[in-house]
Each structure stands twice: as C-alpha cells, then as structure tokens.
Amino acid sequence: QVQLEQSGAEVKKPGASVKVSCKVSGYSLTELSMHWVRQAPGKGLEWMGGFDPEDGETFNAQKFQGRVTMIEDTSTDTAYMELSSLTSADTAVYYCATLQEGGNLYFDLWGPGTLVTVSS
Amino acid sequence: SYELTQPPSVSVSPGQTARITCSGDALPNHFASWYQQKPGQAPVLVIYEGSERPSGIPERFSASSSGTTVTLTISGVQAEDEADYYCQSADNSGTHPVVFGGGTKLTVL
C-alpha cells in the first residue's frame, strides 16, 4: 500500500525559504508523478507544480515560477518542495499528491499536509 | 487564467440528493475529477475520469457532464458526507495543466 509521509510544521520569517519533504513508502518514487498542492487557511486548493517521471522534468504553475524548486531523492524515495522569498500569503498547508494521467489528470493519493506559517 | 466555477455552498437534508456543479469552458475537452475534504484532513479522490469511483468510495457518489458543466451527485446523503468538495480538471493552454474549482461546502441539515 502506497503511503505518503510529510515533514512537520514550519514557522518562517518573511523573506526566508522553506523546504517540505514527502517520503513515499510501499512504492518507488521513480514510478510516481509527485506534485504539490497548497491550501491557505479557509481557502481552496491551489496546484503548484510537479515532476514528470517520463522526462525527468518539473513543470510549475506560472505563479510560482522562479520561486519554487521541486527535487527528488530516489535513493530515499523522498520528494522535496522548496519555496523561497516567503510572504504572509504563503501561509498554507502544503500537500504532496501523486498525479495519475489516465483519461484525465487526477490526484489519487495525498499526503497528510505540512503547515507552513510565515510570520515576523 | 482558466477557472472552474463552483457554488460556495449546498445544503440538503439527510437522505436527499445533493448536486454540486462545476463550470468551465474547457470541460467539454477534459474529464473532471472530484475531491472530498473534511476539516483538518487531506482531500480524498471520490470521482476521476469524469465518472469513475475509486475503490472504497460509496456508490452514492456519481458524476455526469453536460457541455461546460459537470455535476457531482450524492444520492441518499448521509451526515458523514458533510465536507468541502472540489472539482479539478485541465485547461487547454498547456501552461497550467491542473486547475481546481473554488470548492463547495456541503452542509447536511
């Protein structure tokens, strides 16, 4: 059974960076398309971007380009999402989720989420 | 940018049928998926590829499509179905392949 385990909550100051991890168990990360979705308090889901295992490339929402880095450590089956130049608007729960590309794109498995709070 | 539009809230009594709509110009070209999210929990996929249910999702969850609108239907609503529901699809531009609707709060009266 595939499971996703995320790192713990973080508190960061404006301008800092945060790195969130997502460890896969029960499957190989190399066979998954891992993506990141965030949710600000009381708000909806917002796709950030993800990794395409077929070509090894990441593709991100335009909103986050230049500010987000997504990498994968296949030796430990752990994906990382680093977001830089944080502002209070980045306060959110950050989820990793596996993307399936069947008849459409959909997320079949989600991590429990990591709360990132940006506050001075 | 491309948007999927959902009503902010829907209310039904137990045992009734709840219908949650999602509208978007690209929906005739792309299947939609639906997620259920309860407070403090991660979203759970309830419908994918337009109308398919993952293993473990009750049969009372179904979905349909008509033109630029897709509809999640929950038949015989139970108290445990109270949650936020999000539709998700893709746009046609290729620059933002994953789009979520704004979410609908389903209240079971």
Image (cartoon, rainbow, N blue to C red):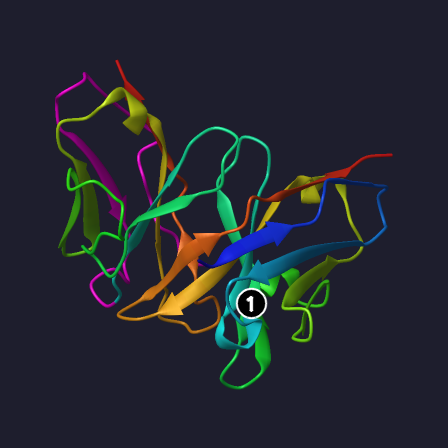
Closer-to-camera residue (A114/A78) = A78
Inspect the magenta stretch and tell me whether residue A118 lies in it: no
Q: Name the image quarter holding residue A72.
A: bottom right
Q: Is residue A28 above or below residue B56?
A: below
Numbered range of the magenta stretch: B1-29
Query: Residue visible at 82% across and 54% down?
Result: A17
B79 displayed left or right of A35: left
Q: Is residue B4 above or below residue A57?
A: above
B105 displayed left or right of A31: left
Query: Residue visible at 21% across and 40% down?
Result: B58
- Outermost residue on the top side: it is B109
Q: The C terminus of chain B lies in which quarter of the figure?
A: top left
Helix, strand or loop at mark 1: strand
Q: Position of residue B16 (x, y in %)?
A: 12, 22
Closer-to-camera residue (A69/B57) = B57
B77 displayed left or right of A74: left
Magenta span dominant secondary structure: loop
Q: Position of residue A74 (x, y in %)?
A: 65, 75
Query: Residue visible at 42% across and 31% down?
Result: B38
Q: Which residue is mark 1?
A: A50
Q: Position of residue A53 (x, y in %)?
A: 52, 79
Q: Name the image quarter holding residue B83.
A: top left
Inspect the magenta stretch and tell me whether residue B5 lies in it: yes
**Disc 1 packing (10 Å; few <14; some 14–19; many ≥20):** many
Amino acid on which disc 1 is placed? Gly
